[in-house]
Amino acid sequence: MSRTFLQIWGWSSIGHPWALNPQAGFTTIALRLLNGRKGLFMERTLVLLKPDCVARRLLGRVLARFEDKGLNLIAMKLMEVTPELARRHYVEHVAKAWYPELEAFITSGPVVAMILEGPEVIRVVREMVGVTNGLKADPGTIRGDFSASQQMNLVHASDGPGSAQREIEIFFPAGGE
């Protein structure tokens, strides 16, 4: 039904910011936003809206913060994280004693994976998200305003250029294009 709606309104035509990815089926919509800012170094990062964010219906509020900041949404999809995908994503934590709890949490419900783009986007997004523990996060950050837990902290954001590239390749094998 969504595909028909998009085609009827012409939203899948070349050059329009919204384009349906026909290979991904009905649950994945790829979004491409044109960047009119010239001369700026544009960086990309992966953001995951975790199962607690989805369950609490905070997706729109969190996404609005990124959009209000002027960041470009390059790709976005609602998906289930399998245990295998969790291990690939959290490879540096697999041997830690608390990893089984982390895996159980991230696989407990759907997540929204997205690629955001902008100048210094990795730093900007991490500052917007706040520190890992929601009880210690500053007011005005996403975790400071909406989270009261270290594990159920609503959002994952890449912590550097290397992890951003690795994580984008894990969640968007085609690069989000």
Image (cartoon, rainbow, N blue to C red):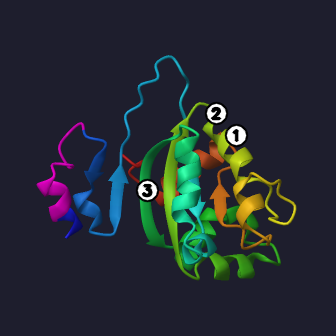
Graded by Cα atoms within 10 Å as few (under 14), some (14 to 19) or many (20 or more), the crowding at tag 2 reads: some
Q: Residue at x 80, y 65 (%)?
A: 134
Q: Residue lying farthest right?
A: 136
Q: Secondary structure at mark 2?
A: loop
Q: What quarter of the picture does the C terminus occupy?
A: top left
Q: Amino acid at mark 2?
A: Glu
- Quick one: label 2 or label 3, which is nearer the N terminus? 3
Please say if the residues under marks 1 and 2 sit with CB atoms less than 8 Å apart: yes
Between residues 8 and 168, which one lies in front from this camera angle? 8
Residue 8 among those drawn in magenta: yes
- In space, the residues marked 3 and 1 are separated at their CA atoms by 20 Å
Q: Residue lying farthest left?
A: 8
Q: Which residue is mark 1?
A: 123
Q: Which residue is mark 2?
A: 120
Q: Secondary structure at mark 3?
A: strand
Give the image location of residue 93, x and y in percent.
Answer: 75, 67
Give the image location of residue 51, x and y in percent.
Answer: 59, 74
- In space, the residues marked 2 and 3 are separated at their CA atoms by 20 Å
